[in-house]
């Protein structure tokens, strides 16, 4: 079983976005939408990222894996690391729901209504996730 098959079989909400690229619901939270991205490199290594900020080690621990499980048994050759391992489109797919949260809050405020404390807190989470995604995408 490849690192990608092993990891993706343990997380929920997996959806392939392109060959060798997936989004998934991060198991360290009760997200209803995908906020994690995975990418399989040509040599079989698997890169994972959570646009909401949870570490790869925490995500792996939540599904019973370790960092070593992201690597195939034997690498055919050593390759240099990539500067931006995730496409900006993957980041945008993962946080599109967060943009809807911001838009709904803006509409409520534009209508002259106050946000509840729960809505304010959720808006802050959305803003934090959007900022993180922009940073990872290099924007």
Image (cartoon, grey):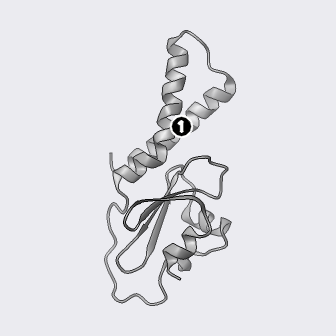
Figure quadrant of residue 28: bottom right
Element under label 1?
helix
Residue 114 placement (x, y as % from top left): 61, 15
Horizontally, residue 1 falls left or right of residue 134, namely right
Residue 39 placement (x, y as % from top left): 42, 66
Q: Identify whether 96 is placed above or below 107.
A: below
Residue closest to the eye, 86 or 5: 5
Horizontally, residue 31 falls left or right of residue 2, namely right
Q: Residue at x 61, y 46 (%)?
A: 32
Q: Residue at x 46, y 41 (%)?
A: 96
Q: Mark 1 points at which residue?
A: 126
Q: Identify whether 98 is placed above or below 85.
A: above
In the picture, the quarter occupied by the C terminus is top left
Residue 100 placement (x, y as % from top left): 49, 32
Residue 70 placement (x, y as % from top left): 51, 76
Residue closest to the eye, 45 or 20: 20
Q: Identify whether 137 is placed above or below 107.
A: below
All told, the count of numbered labels is 1
One can see residue 137 in this view: no
Q: Residue at x 53, y 51 (%)?
A: 35
One can see residue 24 in this view: yes
Count neighbours of disc 1 (C-alpha within 10 A) and say few if under 14, some if 14 to 19, many if 20 or more: many
């Amino acid at each position: 079983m490849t690192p990608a098959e092993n990891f993706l079989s343990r997380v929920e909400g997996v959806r392939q976005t392109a060959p060798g690229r997936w989004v998934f619901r991060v198991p360290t939270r009760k997200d209803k939408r995908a906020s994690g991205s995975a990418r399989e490199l040509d040599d079989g290594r698997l890169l994972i990222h959570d646009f909401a900020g949870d570490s790869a080690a925490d995500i792996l621990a939540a599904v019973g894996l370790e960092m070593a499980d992201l690597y195939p048994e034997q690498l055919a050759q050593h390759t240099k690391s990539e500067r931006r391992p995730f496409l900006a489109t993957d980041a945008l797919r993962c946080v599109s729901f967060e943009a809807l949260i911001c838009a709904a809050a803006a509409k409520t405020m534009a209508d002259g209504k106050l946000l509840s404390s729960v809505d304010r807190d959720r808006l802050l989470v959305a803003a934090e996730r959007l900022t993180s995604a922009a940073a990872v995408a290099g924007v």
